[in-house]
Each structure stands twice: as structure tokens, then as C-alpha cells.
Amino acid sequence: MAQHTSRRDLLRSIGVAGGAGMLYSAMGALGVAPVPDVRAEEYRAPQNSDFTLTGRSGKKVLILGGGIAGLATAYELGKAGYDCRILEAKGRPGGRNWTVRGGTKLTDLDGRTQTASFSKGQYMNAGPARLPQSHVTLEYCRELGVALEVFTNQNANAYIYHENSAALAGEAMRWRTAKADVYGYVSELLAKATDRGALDKELTADDKDRLIAFLRNFGAIKGKADDYAYAGTDRRGYSVEPGAAFEEGTVLGPVPSLSDVIASGVGQRFSFEFGYDQAMLMFQPVGGMDAIPYALAKAIGQDRITYGAKALEVSDLQDGAEVTYEDAQGRTRTQRADFVVAAVPPMIMARIKHNLGSDITAALKYAVPIPVGKVGLEYRSRWWETDEHIYGGITPTDTDLATIWYPSYGYQGQRGTLIGYYNFGANAVAYSDLPHAERVARAVSRGVKIHGEKYRTELDQSFSVAWHRTPHIEAGWVGWPSQSGPEYALLNKPAGHVYFAGDWLSHVIAWQHGAFTSARKVVTDIHERVMAA
């Protein structure tokens, strides 16, 4: 047990130490790096009965931001009778939890406006799009009655597309085919090394026999008579499917060489499906991810949320806190409360005037905004299903698209909406520099290389989001140069009567789970403070 604990602690420390912290957060969201166990510590929501016989009562709490963290804070404190009010700058709840449908409008920081024209029933989840089984987000879906369906995160029929690799460049390879070849050749090499005595110091004779038996099955390699050779099997797929009578099917071929498979780099993709946060099964709300914030808003009470309210100043007072904001009509208003919870992105909060101290401002600026982009492409037919037998899943690429996502809803319907790129960093910035039509043209030109001309000719509608150019958001998420330094620690404590909450104050950044658990921490801290007063 001690060894297991130390290993886990080491992984945690590596993930958040020094300059690796920012990279870790981004890689974790992509599923290409391991993430810590995200099971939250046992949580007990505040209750009205907590105040029985104490003479105390719930206080007034003003919450900046109607994203998941802000909504969850109001929802949980409301269970104990706290008077919670949310000030949200946008005209809807959810923050980055945003589902784009026909009629959705966006004007970005560059003044460019889009209005979505998706068909009825079609949508894109512009922000979060999948829910791991271990995340507390599912607990809230159950509690709030949000219906779920399976989100297909990994699909053996999706592709891996590398056009910059040392071998097999420009060839769209099915995930199942790539995996069969990588596993097959790795098994061949390890079986040969074992049989030739390379592992005699590590393995007994029985161990060697058992390992080779495993490798024969794992890699589908032949027996000793063929020197444990990998030659390809039906695991690669079929060019002609097995059928009736005498149609045995034709196994996909030819099998590339060991050298080409290694040089192609396709094996680097498989860690995605092993990621703790990325492993199947995964889920999504029926009809769009925004079912979660709208359910939270309903439970809180729409009269407790003020939309179009842009915070201008936050003041910590001797007996509470005060917020000055501009309402949707442009009028300046001020509200006082016992506590304020700032559940807005740190770089946004850093620009709001406050009296919390220069160390707070510096800590807020220490978090690094990560550029993120997405485009939704609605097609007149679901050709990826009818022509290529792809039902959900993701195709990773080494192009500036990063990934293409196939929809996990509306199977075998008339129309469908892909995510044509979900990219990060420099690639997201490059796309965001373009007008929407040019973003789409650029993305489609890449997609045609994978799927052919139907990727262009069947396209009907589109909508793109550059989160780092979206008002009141300004990033897909943030990364920390270090989550073990004083900046992160400072913001996890109250600044007088002002608290901070968000996924950025968790070790599950870029997931709603991080926002929920951060909100739970703040709720617990406030409630314990009130009960102890």
C-alpha cells in the first residue's frame, strides 16, 4: 500500500510541478497524458437542518459568473436556505458549457458575428462534450433529472491520419488496423526476444511460456514454426466483408512493414483510450450538453440569476462584500452580500477593479489562458455512417485540425453534424485569425484528404468558436505553470469575504467535474465559516 501511495503521489507531483503544469492540463484534456484519480472526497451538502437550535441562518451570497462553478455554488448553498444571487455577463447560463443550435448568435472580440443555421435537431457542443463515468457531473445529472446517452469517444472504425510522419504519410488508417499492426509487431519482437533468451534474467522458463502464450493471443502472431511472425489477421478489417454462401471475405492488406509501422507514429495514439478521463464508457446529455446548466438554473430559480450583468468592481468590506456591475440596459448598480464568490475565468477577474490586494491580481494573472477552437459542420447526409461505417468516435490527425469528431446522436438519420476541428494552442490561434468562411474552407480542405470530396460537396451549414476570442470567456481553459506554488494556494483561500471557484482551481482542469468539485469546496468553506461564527 505504501508503495502504491508513493507512486500515485509521484505522478501527481510530476503532473503539477514547474513548467509541466500548464502542459499537463492541456494534455490531460486531450487524453494524451495520465490524470490523477478524480473521485471527489466525500461531500455533504449544507442543509436547512444544520441551523436548527443554533440561532444562525443562511447568509446572502453574491456569485459572479453563471458557469458550472457559479451555478453549482448557488444550487448547493440554496439547499440550506442561503440567499444566493448570480450575476452573469452573458445572456444564458453555462459559461463554456454551450450548445449551439439554429439561431444561436455569437459576436467575438474582433467584432465578427455569426448566426447558426443548423437544422432542427442538429447541434454542436461548443464547449464540454463528454462525461466520464467517474466524474461527479453524472451525480448532478441524476439529481437534476438530466437524461444521458452514450458518447462514443473511441471507435475502431474511425481513422488515424498522419501526413507528416516518416512513413505511411497521407494514408487514413482505421484505428482497428493501426492497433492490429502495432500490437502484432510489438508482440512479434517481444516473443522473439523471449525465445532467444534476451529475458532469461527476468523470466523463469514457465514465465517465458506464459508470456509467449499471451503474446500469441495479444498480437495475433503465428507459432514458433514461423518464428512468431506477425502477418496480419482479420483484426485489421476487411476490404471485402464476409457474406453468404462462398464469400469468406478478403482481409485488408497488404500489411506494412515493421519499420513503416514504427515510423508512422500511429502507436502514439493509443494512450488516448487508456486515459483515466477518456476511457469508455462516456456519456452526454440527450439533446445537448447545456441541459446541465439549464437544469441547474431552473433548480436555483431564474429570478435569482441576472443576465447581462458585467462586473465592474468587487470590494471586500469589514462585514461583507460589495459588487458594482453594469446591467443589460447599461445602468450601473451595486449589490452587497455577506460573501462574494468569483466564479469567472481568472484573467477576467484580474481586470475587474478590486481591493483584494496586488498579490491576488498577480495570482490571477499567473494562470495561462489556453487557445481552443471548434467548428461544427452540418451535412445533408450521414455519409460517414452509410459509406464508411463510422458511428461516433474521433479521428486524430497531425494536421492543424487536431481531431474530427463524429456525432454520437441521431444515428441513421437524414442529417448529421461533425466537429470538423477541435484544436488548441497555435493551431487554434491560426484558425481564429480567419473569418468564419475561411476557417471552414481551411478545415474542409484538410478533411477532404481523409474522407474525399463528399466532405466538401455534402456540407450544408457551419458554425465556429474560438474560445480565446469569445467575450467574457477568453480561453478554452487555463493552465498553471505550477499548482504547488503560492499563487494557486492563495486563490484556494478566501480574500476576506471573497472566494474563488472554477475548474481552474482544481486538478481536473477543462472538465465540468473540476468546476463542480471547486464549487463544493467553496460551499463547504462558507458553510463551515457561517456555522462557526
Image (cartoon, rainbow, N blue to C red):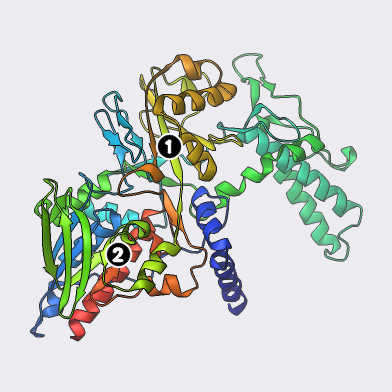
Can the viewer see residue 337 in this picture?
A: yes
The quadrant of the rendering that contains the N terminus is bottom right
Mark 2 is on which residue type?
Ala
In the rendered view, would you say 429 is above or below 415? below
Image coordinates for residue 393, horizontal then vertical, percent: 49, 36
Residue name at image x 53 percent, y 39 percent: 427
- Packing grade of label 2 (10 A; few <14, some 14-19, many >=20) is many
Can the viewer see residue 82 in this picture?
A: no
Image coordinates for residue 253, horizontal then vertical, percent: 73, 24
Image coordinates for residue 316, horizontal then vertical, percent: 21, 74
Residue name at image x 49 percent, y 73 percent: 485
Give residue 517's quadrant in the image: bottom left
- Front-most of residues 371 and 191: 371
Which residue lies under the disc numbered 2?
519
* SS label for mark 2: helix
* SS label for mark 1: strand
Mark 1 is on which residue type?
Lys
Residues at marks 2 and 1, CA–CA distance in whole angstroms: 27 Å
Residue name at image x 59 percent, y 23 percent: 449
Which residue lies under the disc numbered 1?
374
